[in-house]
């Protein structure tokens, strides 16, 4: 294709172009302020998070997203291989 506006997939199938993903992260949920919560038994309690916290995932975002993309692609490759039994037999008879 001349352009890659679809991110490398068309209709869920690879177009042969580079795969382009867009990722969003939610903020880190732990804050260093007392928070009201409940126990498993339903009793009111207060928690306060102490210790080291990552205030920003940006330094690791590329590594995390690249690893997840690799896992998803490997999962789909395995699913595709096992879609037909003769593919599995051919793979193990090599």
Image (tube, rainbow, N blue to C red):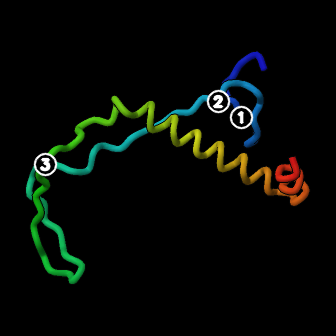
Left or right of residue 44, residue 57 in this image: right
Q: Which residue is mark 1?
A: 9
Q: CA distance from mark 2 to mark 3?
A: 38 Å
Left or right of residue 60, residue 94 in this image: right
The extreme bottom residue here reads 41
Q: Secondary structure at mark 1?
A: strand
| Residue depicted at 24% across the width and 40% down the height | 54
Left or right of residue 28, residue 73 in this image: right
Residue 56 falls in image quadrant:
top left
Numbered circle sitting on residue 93: none
Label located before the other in sequence (2 or 3)? 2
Q: Which residue is mark 3?
A: 51
Q: Position of residue 10 (x, y in %)?
A: 75, 36
Label located before the other in sequence (1 or 3)? 1
Tell me the crowding category of disc 3: few under 14, some 14 to 19, or many 20 or more residues within 10 angstroms, Cα based. Answer: few
Q: Are marks 2 and 1 in contact (CB under 8 Å)?
A: yes
Asked if residue 51 is positioned above or below residue 22 in the image, the reply reads below
């Amino acid at each position: 294709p001349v352009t890659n506006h679809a991110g490398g997939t068309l209709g869920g199938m690879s177009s042969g172009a580079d795969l382009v993903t867009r990722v969003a992260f939610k903020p880190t949920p732990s804050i260093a302020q007392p928070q009201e919560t409940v126990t498993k038994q339903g009793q009111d309690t207060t928690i306060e998070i102490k210790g080291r916290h990552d205030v920003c995932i940006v330094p690791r975002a590329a590594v995390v997203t690249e690893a997840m993309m690799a896992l998803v692609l490997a999962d789909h490759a395995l699913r595709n291989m096992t879609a037909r039994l003769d593919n599995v037999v051919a793979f193990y008879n090599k």
